[in-house]
Image (tube, grey):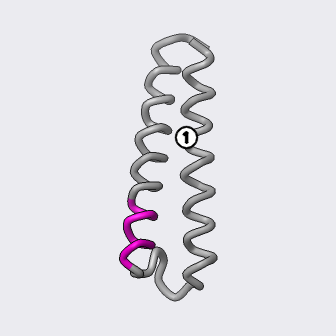
Amino acid sequence: MESGPAVFAGMVFCLFGAALLAWTVTRARQHRPVAQDVSPIASITVAGVAAVIALALGAWCFTRL
């Protein structure tokens, strides 16, 4: 992968993953719903897994430099 697109994709994935993880943790600590009309445990789990996957994809993009 060329360095320009790898840096851009890595930053996008890392920023999205970090923001989603921070938002999910904040909502869970405040005992507020992460997703509307969904089980709290299921929504926290799905959002957390999505955030970790996005962070892993961002790290993978940075290893391709």
Above-or-below relation of 22 to 16: below
Span colored in magenta: 23-30
Above-or-below relation of 55 to 38: above
Query: Looking at the picture, which amino acid does disc 1 mark?
Result: Leu
Quadrant of the image occupied by residue 20: bottom left
Q: How many marks?
A: 1
**Is residue 65 covered in magenta?**
no
Q: Quadrant of the N terminus?
A: top right
The residue sitting at the front extreme is: 29
Residue shown at the point (62%, 65%) measured from the top left: 46
Residue shown at the point (44%, 36%) measured from the top left: 12
Q: Element at badge 1?
A: helix
Front-lying residue, 9 or 32: 32
Q: Position of residue 53 (x, y in %)?
A: 62, 46
Residue shown at the point (48%, 77%) measured from the top left: 35
- Residue ID for mark 1: 55
Q: Position of residue 44 (x, y in %)?
A: 55, 70
**Left or right of 39 in this view: 29:** left
Above-or-below relation of 30 to 21: below
Rate crowding at label 1 as few (under 14), some (14 to 19) or many (20 or more) other CA atoms within 10 Å: many
- Magenta: main secondary structure equals helix
Q: Position of residue 4 (x, y in %)?
A: 46, 14
Above-or-below relation of 60 to 20: above
Q: Position of residue 9 (x, y in %)?
A: 49, 29
Q: Quadrant of the C terminus?
A: top right
Front-lying residue, 2 or 38: 38
